[in-house]
Image (spheres, rainbow, N blue to C red):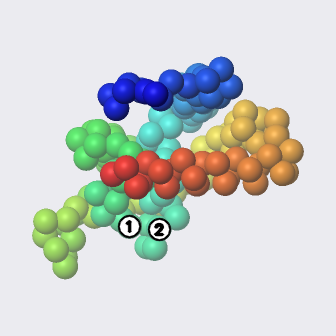
Amino acid sequence: MAEPDEAPWLDHEEMAAWLGLVRLCIRLPAALDAQLRRDAGISHFEYQALAILSMSEGRTMAMSDIAEFTEGSLSRLSHAFRRFEAQGWATRSPDPDDGRVTLARLTDAGYDKVAASAPGHVRTVRKLVLDPLTRKQVRQLHEIVDRIGSAIDAAG
């Protein structure tokens, strides 16, 4: 019987799955980032921030909500938004209903940047993630990431 502090070690199949996932979690973001930097001059993190703004009501969101979506710190996001503002892609202002909140708004130029960057990004996502899978595997992938995401959320 295992001691209470002893880890429940992974069997061969679990270890292979785990190491494959770890490798994928490193390689996929790097590949997406490389494509966006090469073709659009922005990082994957920056693309995600601009994209979520482009899909939000009024192209406006609280910076804290964008940070949560991108899994980035407010400091990292503020650095990106300084660049966006310099490019004319976004603006920031205090929320008129709550001065403690900073709202980010995507400008027309920012929307144009997302629209111009999206086709290459989608092609890369298709090529690297979706095209190698069957339709059934895409559904399974969706279920798998939902289950892992729920476990992460439950762990706090």
Q: Please indicate whether residue 3 sits to the left or right of residue 30 in the image.
A: left
Question: What residue is shown at x 46% (from left), y 73% (from top)?
Answer: 57
Using the image as rendered, state which of residue 135 and residue 73 is in the foreground: 135
Question: What residue is shown at x 29% (from left), y 57% (from top)?
Answer: 63
Using the image as rendered, state which of residue 31 and residue 142 is in the foreground: 142
Label total for image: 2
Residue 32 position, x and y percent, is 59, 32
Q: Is residue 150 above or below residue 127?
A: below
Q: Is residue 107 above or below residue 46?
A: below
Residue under label 1, please give it: 60
For the view shown, which residue lies furthest in the bottom direction? Answer: 97
Q: Are marks 2 and 1 in contact (CB under 8 Å)?
A: yes
Residue 144 position, x and y percent, is 64, 48
The amino acid type of the residue labelled 2 equals Ser
- As measured in the structure, the alpha-carbon distance from the residue carrying label 2 to the one carrying label 1 is 6 Å
Residue 7 sits in quarter: top left
Residue 103 position, x and y percent, is 28, 64
The amino acid type of the residue labelled 1 equals Thr
Using the image as rendered, state which of residue 88 and residue 52 is in the foreground: 52
The answer to whether any part of residue 42 appears in the image is no
Q: Is residue 4 above or below residue 97?
A: above
Q: Please indicate whether residue 156 sits to the left or right of residue 98 in the image.
A: right
Q: Please indicate whether residue 95 sits to the left or right of residue 127 in the image.
A: left
Other residues around mark 2 within 10 Å, as few (<14) / some (14–19) / many (≥20):
few
Residue under label 2, please give it: 56
